[in-house]
Amino acid sequence: MDLFNPESGLVIWMLVVFLLVLFVLAKFAFPVISKSLSEREQRINNALKVADEAEAKLAHVEEERRKILAEAKEAQQEAINEVKAQKKQWLDTARAEAQAEANKIVAEARASIEAEKQQALKEVRNEVAKLSVEIAGKVLRHDLESDEAQMALVNKIMEEDAMLN
Amino acid sequence: MMNLLKKGSIILLMMFVSIFSAFSAETEEKEFSAGDFIFGHIRNAYGWHVTAYNDEEITIPLPVIVKSESRGWLVFSSARLEETGEYEGFKISNSSLHKGRLVEVMPDGSEVRPWDFSITKNVLEILIASALVLALFFSLVRFYKKNPMKAPKGLLGAFEVLVLFIVDEVIKPCIGKGYEKYTPYLLTVFFFILINNVLGMIPIFPGGANVTGNIAVTAVLALITFVYINVFASKDYWKDIFLVPAAPSWLKVPIPIMPILEFVGIFTKPLALMIRLFANILAGHIIELVFMVLIFILSECGKNLGIGIGTGVFSVLFAFFMQVLEVLVVFLQAYVFTLLSSVFIGLSRMEEHAEKE
């Protein structure tokens, strides 16, 4: 029965000692402990946040790098294509120009040849005419003693000749 | 090899025989009372009995401080009570209500209990435990001041983990918003109980006092919890007690059954805390002692070596098992007291909007 009968002295000692401990701890220990713990927690949280941010930034940079690389590749391809097209165009124009020049030269040569030919023909014709006239003169010298008769014959022949031409 | 084994077993047997003959010799001299032995260990005492050596009891004397109605204050050493249990008109009572406590013997022979402020075994143990609690917390404080932003290692690290466990897993979820006001008390009470429980498991000075298994101690702790529950309680808590909006009106109108029950509940909650801790620790101590005492009781009955060795092995095995269980109980009871205090405090702080959620 005495076990269930609290001793007044022990109750008082217990109350005084416990409240004293509680007071001392609440006044001098718990503020420091809770402050340190919360500060540490905050710092850890901050560090984690910073790490997360850095990771996100790194991922972003990686993405950027990839994008830039892709863009550069694309630009390179474009430049190559452009150069190729340019080359082809140049070649085409050059070829066309050369062709035109060649054609022109050929045409000029042809024209010149034609002109020479005409000239030669004319000369030949004149020569032939002269020769003919001389031959004819020599032939006709006997028939045409007088000058008038000679000229009349010549003109007649010339006209015929012209008509023939 | 065989020879050595034989020799060893003979020595062992001789040891057992000598131990038992010693026991039987002792028990023949004075009647062994199991009840007195057990309750002597779990009761509070004026001196701190350490051990017996060469038939001489070794007891640490403690100051006895009493205030008698007629004779005023008296201070003397508990050693004076040891021989006869009497000193200057005071004696150790044998009545059921005050067994083991100092009473003043009146001229007419009646016993009156004086104001007793003695530094008893339990008071000293409370002082030792308090010093340990303070040392633990202040070494943590010193560590934080020396190494800000660092976590302690070793024993202090384990202590910090325990502090964080109580704060984060018990106090915060049970009380919710505004828990900071209660953490000093709940942490102090947890470690106070824990350290007293642990000291109670150590069989020799400075351990071995049955502090948390003493109803005066648990009553004080429950009283403080009671104050913390009711002093800072919210309006809704009182409304729930006296108006009981959850109960149907026929339970309230002619006879206010529910309000009466709720009102009684204010006191039964801390009362349950008081009884739970007291009974659990007391029971642990008693079981442990019973297994030890069993050896002596059975050796007295039979005076038979076989029975003696059998009970010895049995008792030691079971006592060991109980001791291991008690290691768990030591922590669990401190945890349960803190948890239930937090739950009761949390209930007293509930707000109407929190209830609706």
Image: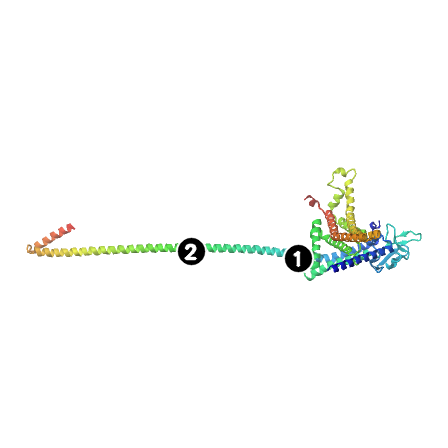
Front residue of B38 and B91: B38
The amino acid type found where label 2 is placed reads Ile
**Closer to the N terminus: mark 2 or mark 1?**
1
Location of residue A138 (image quadrant) = bottom left
Element under label 1? helix
Give the image's coloring scheme: rainbow
x and y percentages locating residue A132 in the rendered image: 12, 55
According to the picture, the residue beneath numbered tag 2 turns out to be: A80
x and y percentages locating residue A92 in the rendered image: 35, 54
Residue at (54% x, 54% y) in the render = A60
Q: Tag 1, which chain? A: A
Residue pushed farthest front? B3
Residue pushed farthest bottom? B146
According to the picture, the residue beneath numbered tag 1 turns out to be: A40
Front residue of B147 and A2: A2
Residue at (11% x, 54% y) in the render = A154
